[in-house]
Image: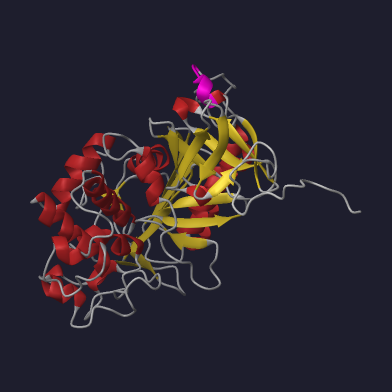
Amino acid sequence: MTHEELLPSTRRSLTHRIATAQAEGRAPSLVAAVVRDGELAWTGARSCVAGHAPDENVQYRIGSITKTFTAVLVMRLRDEGVLDLSDPLEKHLPGTGAGEVTIGELLAHTGGLGAETPGVWWERSSASLRPELSDVLGGRPFKHPVGRRHHYSNPGYTLLGSLIEALRGEPWEDVLRREVLEPLGLSRTSGHPQAPHAGGWAVHPWADVMLPEPTEDLGLMAPAGQLWSTTADLARFAVFLMEGDDRVLGVDSVREMKTPSAPAEAGEWERTYGLGVDLVGGKGYTLAGHTGSLPGFVASLWTSEKDGVGAVVLANCTSGLPVAVVAAELVQIVAEAEPRIPEPWRPLPEVDPAVLELAGPWYWGTGVYVLRLAAEGAVEVGPLAGAGRGSRFRPNGDGTWTGLDGYFAGERLEAVRGADGSVSHLDLASFVFTREPYEAGAPVPGGVDPEGWRGLA
């Protein structure tokens, strides 16, 4: 794929957006980056210090974007067969007092656990006040029935971090560095600040004055929000969230993380949550990523896989700057000003004649569906026109396929042949697809009227 520079007009629009955000949000400094088609396409920065602005290698604290990194480690354990997302926590980390919640529910914030720790504000107090998991969870850790609703939980990700440490036998940060940061080349992402790094500030809500924020080590809460990073490193991580990386997590598992796993709140039907990934839809976009905040810092990372565009915004103020909105608008600016140019059409390198025979229209009842061939023996089945049930299918190697997405995800597709070897029909999750609508002689459930089609007498 050819990587082209952004147009000057697009670059100016990006710069204007972050300049407006820094000025209106009264942030001491703001840094941003955009990736397109796997490459860093633009970086920008604004600062209140005349003649000086941070670059893409200056660290900022990224808060809850840390959760996405933690989720990647859990998914690696799943892909290795060490655990299953349906496993109760008690199976791998006994004695927490919250063992009935499943690992998948912890990832999706549907475990019913509290949003914060009991006691004082954990983000602005010493981790020595919470030396054990019991101090993080408290005596009544559940606020809602398990699995019933999405309720964002920082303690839930503390449990996931402790789970990782128990199964790997190493500190969470060491595992993260070896299994994610080093393979992806994120050399400027760390649990503690490394120069050059920004200082965290609180800006007075009613006066243009500032107050330094303390920087606490989060201790057990680290897997929920400890990390420091840069726009350059998070830009690489954004590419990973769009494309996957077999050294860390394959593209199918990354897409699983970006599949809704939690119900949306009433009135927020365009926003939900996957597995360690926030999901937002609307205005023709589906954005996946995460936001983060800790005293002194706000952060946001959004990706649009369809457009091949991702954006990162980091700032060193406690509040006042809507980084999630700004990062989303950076994605939108690029996607609308310079829409993705499709790759040239190319024929498949090879095709199985037995599969090619299946291509074309099929009928489920009177509904017209089309089977299309895809690369590497895969097929796609969906309605000829309009919305409806459809999916992509991967080959199983035995003449059948398994659904990858959509309505038929996980379902089995088979081309059923008669005694003479000709295709009789397609069998898909009890649905019979025939070459003609209600084809005579086909095993259509309920049978076909022997008098056939007719008009009104």
Frontmost residue, 40 versus 93 = 93
- Span colored in magenta: 349-355
Across the whole image, how many numbered discs are drawn on residues?
Answer: 0
For residue 38, say whether it is visible: yes
Residue 87 at x, y percent in the picture: 23, 60
Relative depth, front residue between 338 and 86: 86
Where 142 falls versus 26 (above or below)? Answer: below
Percent x, y of residue 99:
19, 70
The residue positioned 50% from the left and 62% from the top of the image is 271
Which residue appears farthest toward the top when viewing the image?
A: 349
Residue farthest front in this picture: 450
Q: Is residue 375 magenta?
A: no
Front in this rendered view, residue 329 or 314? 329
Residue occupying image coordinates x 36% and y 58%:
316
Query: Residue 241: image x %, image y %?
Result: 39, 43
Q: Is residue 352 magenta?
A: yes
Left or right of residue 295, residue 342 in this image: right
| Residue 178 pos. (x, y %) | 17, 40
- Name the residue rendered at 8%, 51% in the picture: 169
**Could you tell me if residue 13 is visible in this image?**
no
Q: Is residue 147 above or below residue 31?
A: below
> Can you name the residue that lies furthest to the right here?
457
Q: Is residue 223 left or right of residue 343?
A: left
- What coloring was used for the rendering? secondary structure
